[in-house]
Amino acid sequence: MARMGRLASGGLALVLAGGALALVRRHRHRPPTAAPDPRPGRWQVVTVAGRPEEVLPPGRWPEPLRRLDGAVELSARPAPGGRGTELAARPLSGEPTLPGLAAHLVGDDPGRFLRQALREAKQLVETGEVLRADRSRLDRPGTAG
Amino acid sequence: MRALCWEGADTLAVRQVPDPELRNAQDMIVRVRRSVTCGADLPLLAGRVPHLAAGDVLGHEFLGDVVEVGPEVRRHRVADRVVVCAGIACGACWFCRQGLFACCDNGTTGTAGAEPEWGQPTGGCYGRPALLGGFAGSHAEFVRVPYADVGAFTVPDGVSDDRAVFASDAAPTGWMGAELGEVSPGDVVAVWGAGAVGQLTAAAARLRGADRVIVVDEHDERLRMVERHVGAEPLNYRYLDVPAELRERSGGRGPDVCVEAVGPAASPGLFAGRPGRRADGSPALREAVHSCRKGGTVVLLGTGTGFVDTFPLGAVLDKGLTVRGGRQHGQRWIPMLLERMARDELRTEHLATHRLPLERGAEGYALFRDRADGCVRAVFSP
């Protein structure tokens, strides 16, 4: 198990890929755009208030990312300014098409799915649970009204 | 339970809906004693916010009694009388640790709405569409309160419901206006809007030692409130030239701090300005930028601002202005505001101009929306 350390801009980084080490090139930041993402297999990243070893413990992927083991690669490195850990995920091949169960889970928008999974992993570390919405009347058969 | 539900554009009705339930270990359930109309509800009421569905419960500014607590709730017990911050925040993410609770990363379950519009999802709020939050509103008999230890505050015994309920949203928003403007002794402060937020911004500026506080509005009854309850100077823009008056009352300099607290009533909607839609001109904001002294600060508090065009950006550059804005970080200020309420330094009950049972909720919103019958805020008692 290896974890990304602090890197110079545009440098190379070690990342965890389905349990194995892989060498990937860091991508320069691009401004947000309303147009369809031309690189749907890009890294999705959240900053988590915790140390890298808490966010991505050795030998164990955090929930709910664990179910994507083998389909995505993860990286974790310290965030600047003491903000915690930058936790990143992307489809393993760098392509949006995923195999089997992962494809079913990811659907047509792997970036959005991964962002949601990363958000939930972040919530588990930061608050201990994933915030759940109120259930609607339709979700609660047999309730009054 | 009974709840005030949105049924369609400008249509509300009290319906039977399922009681709320504990969904997370840090939740609690509150029986609502008071729940207040807010200007931020008006775009929802008018049907101008995407994703709102018939049956959604409105309301986010409330106070009540704790009736059930989750296993991880530590600060509250059943029967506590609490005021609940309108914004939902976890208290644990980096933003919360900086005191930026309205920017919480973990305060909402629905990111689909905010992400494309603002770049990142922001904190949660009660009474918003599921895709913009996921939490039912407070115009109901009961409300589920997520992150209860972070967002709910026990009300001191000597503070009435009608006073304390404004600590949920209007009072912290007003306090934030003065704080973002860094109002200091000797300052001249101008506030656009004499609704609850504008009045409480003016009150906060007074408490922070401002020398002159001037409130701009068109409704004489609201401006009389400003004089009587806040001790600020009224300025009715229907009769007076606002920039000229402000220059005269500030020694020709212009106010040090200008706060826009007009709210969404003057805006065509949160999502106007998107491609194919008309953008608003926001005359109050333009006037604030125009009037502010060189090197001064302009603060935006009116929620639902959306997309604004014809903004005098050149004045920001040439006059060296600071422009700030935000949704209130109430978790940061509510304890202090309750203490000030208990000491009688901050009085808010006059803002509750109309006290109505929940069954008259539609009537209360109509009064509030139309500024009819001197309505500043309608307060519902379920």
Image: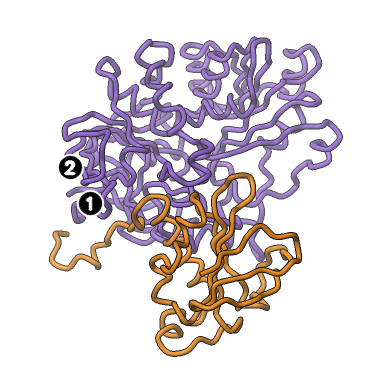
Chain colours: A orange, B purple
2 and 1 marks on the same chain: yes
Residue hosting label 2: B68
Residue type, label 2: Glu
Task: Point out the tag, 2 or 1, that comes first from the N-terminus.
Answer: 1
User: Which residue is situated farthest in the bottom direction here?
Assistant: A100
Front position in the image: B195 or B102:
B102
Quick one: label 2, few (<14), some, or many (20+) residues within 10 Å?
A: some
- Residue at 59% of width from left, 11% of height from top? B209
> Horizontal and vertical percent for residue A75?
56, 67
Between the residue at mark 2 and the residue at mark 1, the CA separation in whole angstroms equals 8 Å
| Whether label 2 touches label 1, CB < 8 Å | yes
Q: Residue at x 27, y 33 (%)?
A: B75
Task: Establish if B216 lies above or below A10.
Answer: above
Badge 1: chain ID: B
Residue B175's place in the image compared with B347, above or below, is below
Q: Which picture quadrant has residue B369?
A: top left
> Label for residue B188?
none
Viewer-side residue, B90 vs B309: B90
- Who is closer to the viewer here, B225 or A84? A84
Local crowd size for mark 1, using a 10 Å CA cut-off: few (<14), some (14–19), many (≥20): some
